[in-house]
Amino acid sequence: MRLILLGPPGAGKGTQADVLAAHYGVPHVSTGDLFRYNLRQGTPLGLEAKGYMDRGILVPDDVTGRMVADRIDRDDAAPGFILDGYPRNLVQGEALEEMLRARQLHLDRAVAVDVPEDVLLARITGRRLCPSCGATYHTLYHAPRREGVCDRCGAELLQRPDDRAETVAVRLGVYRDETAPLLAFYRERDLLTTVSGLGSVEEVAARIREVLHD
């Protein structure tokens, strides 16, 4: 199973990727995890990426692509992989296509997880984090017993800067401009399927498995 999960921030791609990776016995390949791993390990790719980041420059698509290529070349990815966060734009989509072609591999499906924008905003802006013990909460779905206070340790809960409404609006705008065109890219290749991201984790995972004929 070689699958791409597409969708805006807050659609639940990472959660679904974990569920599907466990179901199919293939790795969940997240670009966020790849960056953290390469930076932490001080790999040549990590050092190259750090050089751009230290200068306040976006890491080029080529560097990200080489991190993905390095990951899918590992033995555990031989049966397949679930890609989450890559490709993010058409340049990366074309690079992935060439990367797989060079390895005589192909994608099985690109699944777009569709969630209305008002729901995305509620999901993301409601997140809260305990800076002391790391516990996570949500004002709507998993609220602490006492508003703004961690159940475990009593510390004051924080909202990440990335989860504030004004930042989320920017992130959704970037998705519409850069990532949404990938839907047409994969539709033209008869690889795209769209599923609703509303409902429980289990319900969304069942929808995805259904379109994968499992």
Image: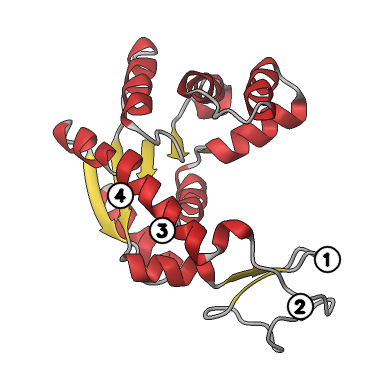
Q: Secondary structure at mark 3?
A: loop
Query: Tag on residue 132?
Result: 1
Where is 207 relative to 144, above or below?
Answer: above
Q: Secondary structure at mark 2?
A: loop
Task: Identify the residue under disc 4.
Answer: 112
Of marks 4 and 1, which one's residue comes earlier in the chain?
4
- In contact (CB < 8 Å): disc 2 and disc 1: yes
Q: Secondary structure at mark 1?
A: loop
Viewer-side residue, 186 vs 178: 178
| Residue 151 x/y as whole percent | 76, 81
- In contact (CB < 8 Å): disc 3 and disc 4: no
Tell me the kind of residue under disc 4: Ala
Task: Identify the residue under disc 3.
Answer: 11
Q: Residues within 10 Å of mark 2 (few under 14, many from 20)?
A: many
Q: Residues within 10 Å of mark 4 (few under 14, many from 20)?
A: many
* Real-space CA distance between mark 2 and mark 1, rounded to the nearest whole angstrom: 9 Å
- In contact (CB < 8 Å): disc 4 and disc 2: no
Task: Identify the residue under disc 2.
Answer: 150
* Real-space CA distance between mark 4 and mark 2, rounded to the nearest whole angstrom: 34 Å
Where is 190 relative to 22, above or below?
Answer: above
Q: Residues within 10 Å of mark 3 (few under 14, many from 20)?
A: many
Which residue lies at the image location 50% right of the left edge and 51% below the top edge? 14
Of marks 2 and 1, which one's residue comes earlier in the chain?
1
Viewer-side residue, 51 vs 141: 51
